[in-house]
Image: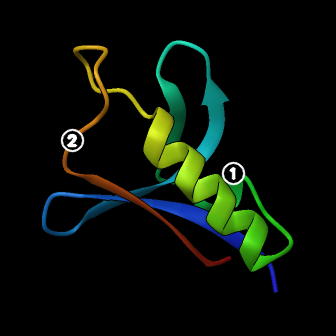
Amino acid sequence: MAYVIKRSYGKSNFDYLHAWCEEWGTSCMLSIKKALVFETKPEADAAADKAQRECKGADGLPAKGVTFSAVPA
């Protein structure tokens, strides 16, 4: 089974990790079809942890109120 990384924010808003970004840490979009795909759950969990650490908000500081998690593709 393949996995993608879902970014959740607000009560019901979400998108998917599309790429790593030097400026913002992560780049996310609504399309699950263009999301980064990980072959195993441990790889996806490691990517979700990295995204959680590296994602920056509009002020350049670590993003608050967002959660990254591995989900089946």
State the image quarter where residue 73 is shown.
Answer: bottom right
The amino acid type found where label 2 is placed reads Lys
Badge 1, how many Cα within 10 Å: few under 14, some, many 20+?
some
- According to the picture, the residue beneath numbered tag 2 turns out to be 64
> Looking at the image, is 63 positioned above or below residue 31?
above
Q: Position of residue 50 (x, y in %)?
A: 58, 46
Give the structural element (helix, strand or loop) at label 1.
helix
Q: How is this picture coloured? A: rainbow
- Per the rendering, the mark at residue 34 is 1
Q: Position of residue 43 (x, y in %)?
A: 77, 65
> Looking at the image, is 70 positioned above or below residue 20?
below
The amino acid type found where label 1 is placed reads Lys
> Looking at the image, is 42 positioned above or below residue 13?
below
Left/right placement of residue 65 relative to residue 17 reads left
Residue at image location 28% in from the left, 26% down from the top: 57
Left/right placement of residue 34 relative to residue 68 reads right
Q: Earlier in the sequence, mark 2 or mark 1?
A: 1
Give the structural element (helix, strand or loop) at label 2.
loop
Marks 2/1: CA distance?
24 Å
- The residue most toward the right is 39
